[in-house]
Amino acid sequence: MPGRLRAWRVAARSRTRQGVVRVRTAFVPVLWASLAAGVAVAIAYVGLGHTYPFFAAIAAWVCLGFSPDVQPRRVGELALGVSLGVGLGELFAHLFGTGPVQIAVVLFLAALVARFLDAGQMFTTQSGVQAIVVVGLPAIAVSSGPVGRWTDALIGGGVALLFSAFLPGDPRTRPRALGREVLLELADVLGALTEGLRLGDAHRIEDALVAARGTQTPIDSWRGAVTSAQQTTRISPAWRRRAGEIAELDRACTLADRAIRNARVLARRAAVAVRDGFDPGPVPAQTHALSVAARELAQAVGSGSDAAAARSALADVAAHLRPEDFEGWRQQSLVILMRSLTTDLLQLTGMPYAQARATFPGGPGDDGAAPPPSSSPAV
């Protein structure tokens, strides 16, 4: 039971950190979407005299949402989907009234029309949802006419599209921030692993393993942010010249994912070894040095600056990872795993794969390191 409580505590701490990061990154997009919803309602209410223009707010919020990866093209597609659903629902309700049969039929029609017009899943989903809402709810704004709610949806979508073009942001910002958080998590994992090895405490090492397993969500978020940034650079002429930097962040994400997987294996092997009462010798000193280097690398990735300091620190770690210098097969097996992890991090600094392997004493050796995802530098 104490072990389970420790695992819950570690998981809660990791989730709290990730939650704070999500709130921080969503703050400006949510504020922007809220302002867009208010403006859309004001236009419909004041400009057109619609009494209850809540579809204007719904359309603005659905199109912009809370993601910092807002793309005008995607917003336009969602605006069209919402307007299509509301328009079909409005027309169907005006001609045939409301009821269970009408809702089923209008959903069927709206979804098929949406699938014909666009391949996007969200486009079809929003078309169907808005059609259901329009047919299922009474026309509360009678004064706005038979197509009032459709007009409100068009206004909301148009305002969202306008706001998306001016949403403050750099497509590199979020991938960098998420990359920094992932690498800080890796540094914390290595720090907890170091403590466990020094104290001979398998529970601390298991805490490190739990924390390492909890990094998959931020890694997936990082990968999604990179994909969105790549789409932005393809669409926006202003950011097209940054496509190379986004490609580097994409490679960095792959390497960081690989490094954390290696850290999980390292923690799992270390926990077994500590339970068997082995002497870690100088291994904790090297895991500590790796933790410090990973933290330095996190700052470089987060700021987009040169990773020379982290590269130097990692090269120093690599110079001390000669398996023959460690006693016993357990120490040596941990060192071999650390060599693979260090190779990934060296590539993250922009070092070519062959050069990273050659950094270790005695040449590349056979440390099980995977080949590089590409030949371009990551940071």
Image: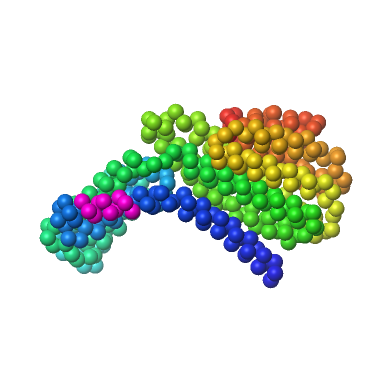
**Which residues make up the magenta segment?**
34-43
Kindly identify the residue that appears in the image at 67 percent across and 65 percent down.
Answer: 6
Queried whether the magenta region covers residue 126, the answer comes back as: no
Q: Residue at x 38, y 52 (%)?
A: 30
Q: Position of residue 250 (x, y in %)?
A: 53, 38
Instruction: Give residue 93's quadrant in the image.
Output: bottom left
- Up-down: is 237 above or below 29? above
Instruction: Please state the horizontal and vertical placement of residue 83, each as a whole percent of the image.
Output: 24, 50
Expressed as whole percent of the image width and height from the top left, the position of residue 349 reads 63, 34
- In the image, residue 319 above or below residue 142: above
Question: Magenta segment: does it hold 36?
Answer: yes
Q: Position of residue 131 (x, y in %)?
A: 25, 57
Residue 239 versus residue 65 in the image, above or below: above
Most common SS among magenta residues: helix
Please report the residue visible at 15 percent of the width from the left and 52 percent of the height from the top. 48
Q: As drawn, which residue projects farthest toward the right?
A: 327
The quadrant the C terminus occupies is top right
Residue 255 visible to the viewer: no
373 or 16, nearer to the observer: 16
Residue 199 visible? The answer is: yes
Left or right: 223 as drawn, with respect to 89: right
